Image: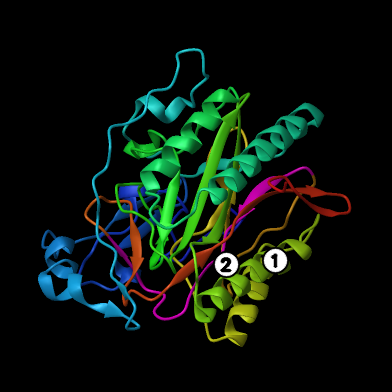
Amino acid sequence: MATAKTLQPRIISSFLGNNSILVSTQPLPHLFRFHLERRHVSMQLSRTLSGLTNLLFNTRNVDELIDGKRKRLKPGHVSPRRPVPAHITKPPYVESLKVPGISSGLEIHDEDGVERMRASGRLAARVREYAGTLVKPGVTTDEIDEAVHNMIIENGAYPSPLGYGGFPKSVCTSVNECICHGIPDSRPLEDGDIINIDVTVYLNGYHGDTSATFFCGDVDEKAKKLVQVTKESLDKAISICGPGVEYKKIGKIIHDHADKYKYGVVRQFVGHGVGRVFHADPVVLHFRNNEAGRMVLNQTFTIEPMLTIGSRKPIMWDDNWTVVTEDASLSAQFEHSILITKDGAEILTDC
């Protein structure tokens, strides 16, 4: 975590699974307590939770058209977990259903570690771009997951999401109003969809983490603009990074850019250190904040802004992973793993 002594209780890690968000009548700031020493988020919920299926997927909501064009997302069939050959090295968390949370300490690397981070980043980027070529009307997100899984395995790496806190698939596929952590399933992509594909690989003991939002078929200008601005916000954030730069400047430049277009900035999910562990310090906030901490030479972390056209309030499905916008408005995300160098920042997950 950035050297802040306190963290607002609404902030949670970017991939904390069923320790993250649940549907509740309580506002988000009252749901979470961030434990500085244990580096995880605990829930502060009453025992009465509103069932998301009843809330969102009754007949009226399923048939409701958003912007007069598309239906709300609903869960599809999730296929069985795909096997990984025994010779592939697995991250320590794979055999546990517990979410590891954020590990204390920055990911700072020696020369060998930097080269390993570059290798994992290059592979993650190649997989991401290959997955993007599969985005076509009629293709299911489960088919994308299968292709991603096979490509990662064929390159001697492990798909980091698989088994992380019980996550059942090898990639996250977040369609339309899905903010993040969508589970690949049987839903075919439709003409006009946008989809974020979030790829992380574990290669030679190091994670490379990246995502991009892709167009499916003929996408309208409103969606294209959101995707463009989200990508620009990531690029602007990376451009100001370097040794000694305050982490909070990342949030300011992203938030300032989003404000120009009146887009929402999702606050509950954050960037993070990445390297030998999947999620480490610092916690990288994508909105204006006053958290302390400065970037360090040879440090690696992710920046992964999520912008929305409408409400920035997230709601989690009953699967304890899939997070969607409250009003079903579109959301887009881009992510890179970066290395802090003496000259600024090197993008590790660029092709």
209 left or right of 139 in image: right
Q: Is residue 128 above or below residue 79?
A: below
Q: Which residue is mark 1?
A: 237
Q: Is disc 2 placed on a helix, strand or loop?
A: loop
Residue placed most toward the observer, 52 or 187: 187
Where does the image place residue 43, in percent across and percent down from the top left?
28, 55
Q: Which residue is mark 2?
A: 286
Q: Are marks 2 and 1 in contact (CB under 8 Å)?
A: yes
| Residue furthest out toward the top | 87
Residue 168's tag is none
Residue placed most toward the observer, 111 or 160: 160
Instruction: Choose the circle earlier in sequence order: 2 or 1.
Output: 1
What residue range appears in magenta? Answer: 298-316
Q: CA distance from mark 2 to mark 1?
A: 9 Å
Q: Residue at x 47, y 53 (%)?
A: 14
The amino acid type found where label 2 is placed reads His
Where does the image place residue 74, in percent across and percent down from the top left?
25, 60
How many numbered circles does the render carry? 2
Crowding near the residue tagged with mark 2, few <14, some 14–19, many ≥20 C-alpha atoms within 10 Å: many
Crowding near the residue tagged with mark 1, few <14, some 14–19, many ≥20 C-alpha atoms within 10 Å: many
The amino acid type found where label 1 is placed reads Ala
Q: Is residue 72 visible?
A: yes
